[in-house]
Image (cartoon, coloured by chain):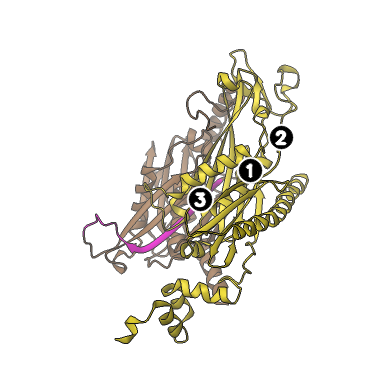
Amino acid sequence: MAEKTEPAAAAASRLAGEMEVEAYRRLFPLAFLERHLGESVRPDARRLSEARPTTVALGAVSSAHGSALVRLGDTAMLASVKLEVMSPPAESSDEGSVAVEFHMPPICSPLVRPGRPADVAPVISKALEDVLMSSGMLNLKELCLISGKASWLAYLDIYCLNADGSLFDAALISAVAAFTHLEIPLVSVGDDGRVFTVGGNEGKTKFELVNREKRKLTLGDIPFSLTCALHKDSILADPTSEEESIIETYVTVVVDSSDRIVSIQKLGGTVTSMTAVKECISLAKERRRKLREILIDSVEVMEVDQTE
Amino acid sequence: MSAQAGAGTYSPAAAAGDKRREKREELRRHLAEDADWPRADGRSFHDCRPAFMQTGPTTAASGSAYAEFGKTKVIVSVFGPRESKKAMMYSDVGRLNCNVSYTTFATPVRGQGADNKEYSSMLHKALEGAVMLHTFPKTTVDVFALVLESGGSDLPIIISCASLALADAGIMMYDLVTSVSVSCFGKNIIIDPMSDEEAWQDGSLMVAFMPARKEITQLTLTGEWSDGRITNAVELCMDACSKLGDILRDRLKDTATLTSE
């Protein structure tokens, strides 16, 4: 059997003519991808530096104070912000805080099973928290209600509903969008020192309102991210899960709205030249302009919906 | 900078707690006595909420379905048939593995029961009789449900949604399974109850039904019922299940025509 000694790649290209596309794709994923990259195109017909179509829908969860549903190609993320009252710790008595949690429920991917959570979930969770807190987007003082007595604890929960690659990017957009949508409830303080919500008009005379002016957060520099997969000389922006499973090296770049770099992550993989990393940074800056427009559009769409 | 979650935090409740309780009592009295009392969302007693169902929200799964009944929103993904867990004994019929979980924002109080063991086993029992387990020997089909928002009648909606997802995945079944529940208030029976109605009901009945074969796969009954009313309620559920079955069938035909075009 001479065929067995042939290198896999050569065997793959020889077989290519005789096989059905789908079978070839499954049996020789790397050769399949490389043949596409040779033509400067991706298996889903995108250009190498092109991200997938992205949509943001605000207010997807009615029970949350702020929420957003984000689709990045087939990847879907649902983020929700729910506010609870806490007594702030002594060292930061005039600040609220944020608890970030990223969930990958078993519905989102065949790799996750109940009771056996995905390994990447806590990694993404931590990375999100780092980026959100270090980017200066949130001013925690705005989450304070009464200095030293009560402040908001914002629970940010992000659920991955469909995992098809670039999970961190999608999760970050959904988190930012949920904070954009966040509306802080009007509250007052009772005799027992507990905070309660005041609905609409009835509170006007009876209760003294604590936060009449602080209903929306003023977001500072908003972070946007782009993940690129590096394969030989090619840089593939916004990889799908199929591409992620074949390629080992990724670079995730987070830039803020004034094009400053918030974070660069390259976890393992093969060695990468500085030129490639620079290329990723410039792609990320381009992507952030696009994402910013999408986010602004989503706010406008929501406002139109509300006035109708 | 992670917050001290859990102890010491609370979600600020509306001020007038007592007033709410009075309102509840009033609603309960009316529902028990007066058949003309409107429900909170303006439905009559024997109307279901408008349903929205769709196949294929999760492309990573073999099959999936999304269901929205009023505020209740559910996604079900089906994976497999795939290799059973290593620890499993040899079996010449396939296995059905069900799991139901809730998002942390599904319920008014944050993070109550991410995994719902009771619903997981009820879902399994409701579907088991309809799936042709002998068509995938030695392997497992996983049915995972995630409740995005809970607004009442959660389990019946999960069951109907799961059977749509199984059909979308191409798993062989004797028939679709649809499910509807009713709540009993005094002498009145109301169909497809919301969370508030479920909280104050005197009794409840849930039926999981195979509409084409006219067979019941699961029936649970709680509270005080008389014989005659049980029969009435079961018939009401079966009728609604048949109609829901038609909707599911239409959804499957829609996707089939879309893909064949």
* Upstream in sequence: badge 1 or badge 2: 1
- Residue bearing mark 2: A216
Task: Give the chain letter at badge 1.
Answer: A
How would you rate the neighbour count of disc 2 (Cα within 10 Å): few for under 14, some for 14-19, many for 20 or more?
Answer: some
Question: What is the magenta range?
Answer: B72-89
Q: Residue A178 carries which label?
A: 1
Q: Work out which quarter of the rendered image holds the N terminus of chain A and state it.
A: bottom left
For numbered disc 2, what is the local secondary structure? Answer: loop
For numbered disc 3, what is the local secondary structure? Answer: strand
For numbered disc 1, what is the local secondary structure? Answer: helix
* Nearer mark to the viewer, of 2 and 3: 2
Q: Residue A45 carries which label?
A: none
- Taking B248 as reference, is A78 above or below it? above
* Chain drawn yellow in the picture: A
How would you rate the neighbour count of disc 1 (Cα within 10 Å): few for under 14, some for 14-19, many for 20 or more?
Answer: many
Can you give x and y, in whole percent of width and height, for residue B63 in the image?
46, 63
Residue pictured at 58% horizontal, 64% vertical? A236
Q: Is residue B193 visible?
A: no
Residue pictured at 74% horizontal, 50% vertical? A301
* Nearer mark to the viewer, of 1 and 3: 1
Can you give x and y, in whole percent of width and height, for residue A115 in the image?
36, 46
Q: Do labels 2 and 3 share a chain?
A: no
- Residue bearing mark 3: B74
Q: Which amino acid does label 1 sit on?
A: Ala
Q: Do the residues labelled 1 and 3 touch (CB within 8 Å)?
A: no
Can you give x and y, in whole percent of width and height, for residue A60 in the image?
62, 47
Task: Give the chain letter at badge 3.
Answer: B
Q: Can residue A161 be seen in this view?
A: yes
Residue pictured at 23% horizontal, 65% vertical? B92
Q: What residue type is labelled 2?
A: Lys
Q: Which amino acid does label 3 sit on?
A: Val
